[in-house]
Amino acid sequence: MKKIIWISSYPKSGNTWMRFLLANYFFNHKMEFDRKIIKYIDRLHFPDAISKRNKENKLDFNQIAKFWIPTQEKFKVENGQVAFLKNHNANISIGGNKYTNENFTIATIYVVRDPRDVVVSGHNYFGSNYDKLIKSICDDKFFTILDDKDKGNLEVISTWDTHFKSWTQTMPNIPKIIIRYEDLISNTEKVFNETIVFLSKILKFQIDNQKIKFSVENSKFEKLSKMEDEEGFKENLGNAQKFFRKGETNQYQNILTKDQIETINQKFKNEMKYLKYL
C-alpha cells in the first residue's frame, strides 16, 4: 500500500526546484538538460467531481477533504512501487478526514522557507498585496486554487506554522527530512547530497555521485530562469512576472515594513526560532 514520497512545502518555498533536482537524478537517463524532466514528479490529481463542485461554488472544506484518502487509494504507480508527488496541502484532518497517513506514505521531504520571503515571493507570483498575503499565511482557513485551468487543483494551506508542523510532527513512523530553502541556495550540492543519502537508506539504492553533480548543474536557478525566458513555464499562473524570478534570500528586508515583519515574527516566533530564522 505504501507508495508515495511527498515533496511538501508551503507555496513559493522551493518545491519546484527540489522537483527538478530529484527528477534529474532519478529520471534523466540521457544525462542531458531536459526542459520537461519535471513532468515525472507531478501532484495528486483529484477526480472531476471536485472541479465541477468548485465551478458551481458548491465546494467547502469538508467536501474537499472527503476526496483526499480515496484519491490516494486509487492512485496507481507506473513502472514501480514508488512515486514522488509534489504537494502544498497541509497534512491536516477536516471532518475526520486526514490528508494522508502512514498507509500511503513512504517518506516526506519538507522544503521550508523564511515566511517573510514567502510573502515577498508570493506577491510576485499571486499578484496579491503584502498585507493580504500576510493575513493569508496567518489564516488557518486559507486555501488556494493553484491552477486557473484546473479548478480541481485545490489545496488547503492553513497557516505557515501549522503547515510546517503538520508534515514534520505527524506520522511518527515515517522518515522525514527538513530542507531549508536558504541552505539549498547557499550549498546546493551538499544539501541535495544529504537528500539523496536520506532516500538511499529508505529505497535501498547505491548513490551515484556523478548523477548528483549532474542534477545540481542542470537544475541551477540560472538555467531554469533562462529556460522560462525562452519557452515559458507551464506552472506560471500568468499573472507573475516570472516563476523563476530571483531565487534569493532575505528579500523581505528591503521590501516589507517594520510592522509587517513584526507581525510575521510574532505569529511564528517559535517555529522561526527553531529553524534559525530568528
Image (tube, grey):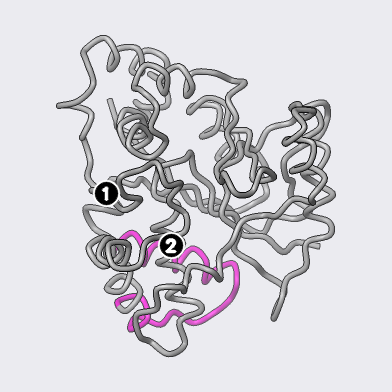
Question: Magenta segment: does it hold 208?
Answer: yes
Quick one: SS at disc 2?
helix
* Residue at 15% from the left image edge and 26% from the top image edge: 254
Q: Nearer the viewer, residue 203 or 100?
A: 100
* Magenta part, dominant SS: helix
Tell us which disc is closer to us: 1 or 2. 1
Expressed as whole percent of the image width and height from the top left, the position of residue 177 reads 48, 51
Q: In this rendering, is residue 63 above or below 222?
A: above
Quick one: SS at disc 1?
loop
Residue 116 horizontal side relative to residue 36, left or right: left
- Callout 1 environment at 10 Å: few (<14), some (14 to 19), or many (20+)? some
Q: Nearer the viewer, residue 117 or 245?
A: 245
Q: Quadrant of the C terminus?
A: top left
Pointer 1 or 2: first along the chain: 2
Q: Residue furthest bottom?
A: 30
Q: In this rendering, is residue 33 above or below 174?
A: below
Which label belongs to residue 245? Answer: 1
Which label belongs to residue 195? Answer: 2
Residue 137 horizontal side relative to residue 228, left or right: right
Q: Nearer the viewer, residue 37 or 90?
A: 37
- In the rendered structure, which amino acid carries the disc numbered 2? Thr
First to last magenta residue range = 190-213
Separation of disc 1 and disc 2 at Cα? Answer: 25 Å
Expressed as whole percent of the image width and height from the top left, the position of residue 273 reads 34, 26
Q: In this rendering, is residue 105 above or below 278?
A: below
Question: Magenta segment: does it hold 201?
Answer: yes
- Find residue 18 and report its image quarter: bottom left
* Residue at 80% from the left image edge and 46% from the top image edge: 69
- In the rendered structure, which amino acid carries the disc numbered 1? Arg
Expressed as whole percent of the image width and height from the top left, the position of residue 125 reads 38, 40
Residue 201 horizontal side relative to residue 82, left or right: left
* Residue at 33% from the left image edge and 84% from the top image edge: 210
